[in-house]
Image (spheres, rainbow, N blue to C red):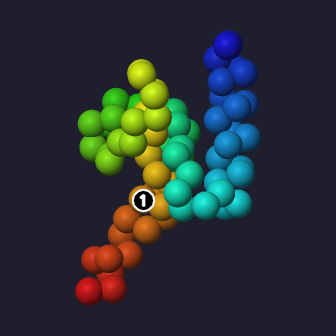
Amino acid sequence: MSSDERKKRINEILQRLPTLPDSAIVPVPVVAAHDNVSERTVRRRYPMVKVSVGRAGVQLGYLRHRGRQAVAA
């Protein structure tokens, strides 16, 4: 997959995020683009969910609600 194809695919997933449930697992490159951080930062600092051998992601619910507990308290 070329770099342009990868960017297009990431943008397509980013546009669909509002329609996905909190239980959806978002791929690391999409999370990195969503939060404007590197993929390495995502792998090191975010709670990863193993999807299969060599594939992991982050639950969409974490991305949506991560700051709300501190505000509600």
For label 1, the crowd category at 10 Å Cα-Cα, with few meaning under 14, some 14 to 19 and many 20 or more, is some
The quarter of the displayed image where residue 62 is located: bottom left
Percent x, y of residue 27: 52, 37
Q: Is residue 73 above or below residue 37?
A: below
Q: Is residue 16 above or below residue 32?
A: below
Left or right for 30, reference 10: left
Instruction: Identify the residue at the far front of this view.
Output: 52
Q: Nearer the viewer, residue 38 or 54?
A: 54
Which element carries disc 1, helix, strand or loop?
A: helix
**Which residue position holds label 1?**
62
Percent x, y of residue 55: 45, 27
Residue drawn at (66%, 24%), measured in percent from left and top?
A: 6
Tell me the kind of residue under disc 1: Tyr
Q: Nearer the viewer, residue 42 or 49?
A: 49
Percent x, y of residue 69: 32, 77
| Rendered-image quadrant of the N terminus | top right
- Residue 33 visible? The answer is no
Left or right for 63, reference 1: left
Count up the numbered dots: 1
| Rendered-image quadrant of the C terminus | bottom left
Residue drawn at (37%, 65%), measured in percent from left and top?
A: 66
Instruction: Identify the residue at the far top of this view.
Output: 2
Residue drawn at (34%, 30%), measured in percent from left and top?
A: 40
Q: Is residue 73 above or below residue 2?
A: below
Left or right for 51, reference 41: right
Percent x, y of residue 32: 47, 39
- Residue 56 visible? The answer is yes
Residue drawn at (32%, 46%), measured in percent from left and top?
A: 46
